[in-house]
Amino acid sequence: MKKRGRIKIPKIKTWQLLVILVPLLFVDATLLRLDHIRMTELRDAVLTADANEDDEAIKQSLEELKKFVFSNMVINVVDDNGEKKITFGTGPFYLEHQYIRAANAALKEAEKQIASDSNPNGNIYGLASETCRAQAISNGWTWDNPNYINCMVSEIQKYPAADEIQDKIIASLPSTELYRHNYASPIWAPTLAGFLALITVIIIVVIFIRFFIWLFLRLSLLFM
């Protein structure tokens, strides 16, 4: 009765583990690739909403992107100063158009404050605007082009008598970090890709342990 009650677990040989491992690695890579593609689609939706200047769509698409990345294993390759690095998550991306709108709003507010400026250099904003407007026409810049914003800030900073005004303008410009996003995903998540990856790691560890045991026994026999 005791013998009948025992459950016999078949021993899986190492070569059988290798046979299982090969297709499992392919499935893992496919699932991780699908997660990466989905992340890219959601990130592109954020950038599209930014290009369309739709703040509500930006907010919703950011939430969808963040929710997906936080609950899935997303492996990504990012460019770090010309060097390719593997990371878990979206990697840094910027809401350029939203920043430009905010910066232009700050510059317009500065224009109102500087319009009645009575410093020795005259209306600094007006002088800077004339210079940058000419450059914008010759280069085909639109009013919301970042080159135009940089030109305005650069021209205003050329007037030493306007240090206080310059400080106000620089302080009013929003920080670019507010428009920079980088969502990190977990190294492991309880998804289909996560469980299969865990099984894959366990099989690889078992194979390595068996290999080192075999190698140790072989070396032991040589020196006996």
Image (spheres, rainbow, N blue to C red):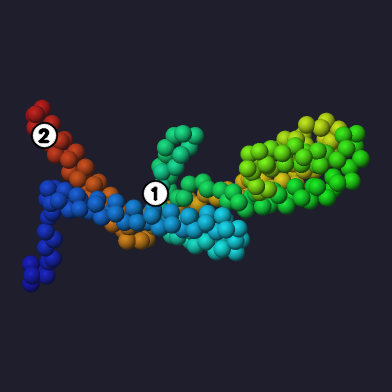
Could you tell me residue 14's position as x and y percent?
14, 48
Q: Residue at x 24, y 50 (%)?
A: 25
Foreground tag (1 vs 2): 1
Q: Is residue 28 left or right of residue 42?
A: left
Residue 49 seen:
yes
| The quadrant where residue 207 appears | top left
Q: Residue at x 65, y 47 (%)?
A: 142
Depth order, front residue of 50/140: 140
Q: Which type of secondary structure does the marked residue at label 1 adopt?
A: strand
Could you tell me residue 89's position as x and y percent?
45, 50
Which residue bears the numbered disc 2? 218
Residue density around tag 1, few if under 14, some if 14–19, many if 20 or more, within 10 Å: many
Residue density around tag 2, few if under 14, some if 14–19, many if 20 or more, within 10 Å: few
Q: Is residue 132 left or right of residue 14?
A: right
Q: Which type of secondary structure does the marked residue at label 2 adopt?
A: helix
Spatial distance from mark 1 to mark 2, Cα to Cα? 39 Å
Depicted 162 relative to depicted 51: above or below: above
Type of amino acid under label 2:
Arg
Could you tell me residue 53's position as x and y percent?
60, 58
Residue extending farthest to the top is 223
Depth order, front residue of 199/31: 31
Which residue bears the numbered disc 1? 75
Return the disc, 1 or 2, that comes first in the chain's sequence: 1
Type of amino acid under label 1:
Ile
Depicted 82 relative to depicted 90: above or below: above
Residue extending farthest to the front is 138
Q: Quadrant of the N terminus?
A: bottom left
Residue extending farthest to the bottom is 1
Depth order, front residue of 172/104: 104
Q: Residue at x 52, y 61 (%)?
A: 61
Q: Residue at x 34, y 53 (%)?
A: 33
